[in-house]
Amino acid sequence: MTKEIRSVEFVVLPTSRTKARQMFQIAGACRFVWNHFREKNLGDYQNFKNGKGTQPPVSFFSLGVEFSKLRHETDWLRKLPAHPVRYTLKHFADALKQAMQGKKGFPKPRSRRQTIPSFTLPSEENFGIKKLNEKYSLLRIPLVGWVKLTRRGGNPYEDNVPKQVVLRHDGRRWRAFVFYEVEVEEKLDDGKVLGVDMNVRQIATSDGHFYFLPDLRRKEARRKKYQRRMARQVKSSNRRKDTKKKLAKVSRKIVNIRKNWVHQTTKEVADRYGIVVVENLNVKVMTASAKGTVENPGKNVRQKARLNKGVLDTAFGEIRKKLEYKCGRLIEVNPAYTSQTCSECGHADEENRKTQARFQCVSCGFASNADTNAAMNIRRLGMARLHGEGSGISTAPANREIDARLPNGQQSI
């Protein structure tokens, strides 16, 4: 048995408008602290990058000392709980450290209209959770008091120890993400290897299965309609506020559908195979804009933008992240030429894949679905890595998952 951190999502039901307003006040204080320390460290960051000064302190402890001074000098900030507001500096310290190392840019300011209201209860001393009945649980928030939590299916980890709570407003209601420390059985490496090829709005596996992203075209069309309507309406008007609520509602549905598909797909894959092999894709480079510059304008900009949207909708990074903790082992391989190489004879040629869906080798005549063929090549690369690590698994499959050769010399398409 090993210990892992698992999160459970609840819907928060504040028992009064006062409690809901207090939760927004805590989230607003977190936003204020973030912006305050951003402005305070911006000059030191610029001097450090220009070589005119030393690196400013970026640790959570050093920022926490400055926060204590700020809280002592600000009357309204002293009336709010200290721990949830101060924990914002933990995220700011991580962002500032990455900026100093050159991995990311300087942290951006958080605005009232564009930033999602949220705050964190960092440790179990700052909150309390208890079961009320079969349908509801209670969460104690500093200053706010007890609020109801509900979740379809109940709480699967109610007997475990909660370590942290993150509260976030989704535009309609507050949601609580409770992180529990649970004991789980170690994921056994059963020796079964599966290759996964991630494509636009679908993933294909080396055993012939396809998992398609649900059709979201109607909801996306509705979202575009509300976006166009908002663009024509007067800012701060009541009609624009109503349209904004409708836009947020349809956007939540799209996000939830995609998130559910990722979870269900990765669970099914991880339940059947202990070792999963995926491509090490650089999504940021894949989805770069093709518009170019004024001097060198790009070509097929609209088509590339549509392709980028499809790649982002499929959530390659989320699929890889979910498989990493659900399956026994996740192996990443180089995706180069996996879609042009024949999984039967190993011949690599761009003429092997004349269309998006069909693969036919110009050397041996092997024909198959293009994504399934790529998944089989990905599986072969993963098995080669395991063989190199001394796992004893041969790089040549003992049996083919899909036999594309049919009787009488026919070939599948």
Image: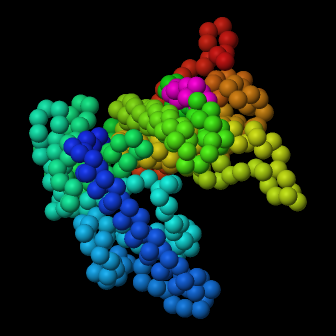
The residue closer to the viewer here, 76 or 133, is: 76
Q: Which residues are magenta?
A: 210-221
As drawn, is 36 to the left or to the right of 123? right
Q: Quadrant of the C terminus?
A: top right
As drawn, is 146 to the left or to the right of 285? left
Q: Determine the residue located farthest toward the top in the rendered image.
A: 408
Which residue appears at 29% of the width and 40% of the height? 11
Q: Quadrant of residue 72 in the image? A: bottom left
Which residue appears at 62% of the width and 32% of the height? 225
Residue 210 in picture, x, y percent from top left = 52, 26
Q: Quadrant of residue 360 in the image? A: top right
Q: How many marks?
A: 0
On the question of residue 380 being in view, the answer is no
Quick check: is 262 in the magenta stretch? no
**Position of 211 relative to 37 (above/below):** above
On the question of residue 136 being in view, the answer is yes
**Position of 181 relative to 366 (above/below):** below
Quick check: is 215 in the magenta stretch? yes
Q: Quadrant of residue 82 in the image? A: bottom left
Residue 42 in picture, x, y percent from top left = 53, 79
Residue 247 in picture, x, y percent from top left = 53, 37
Which residue appears at 52% of the width and 26% of the height? 214
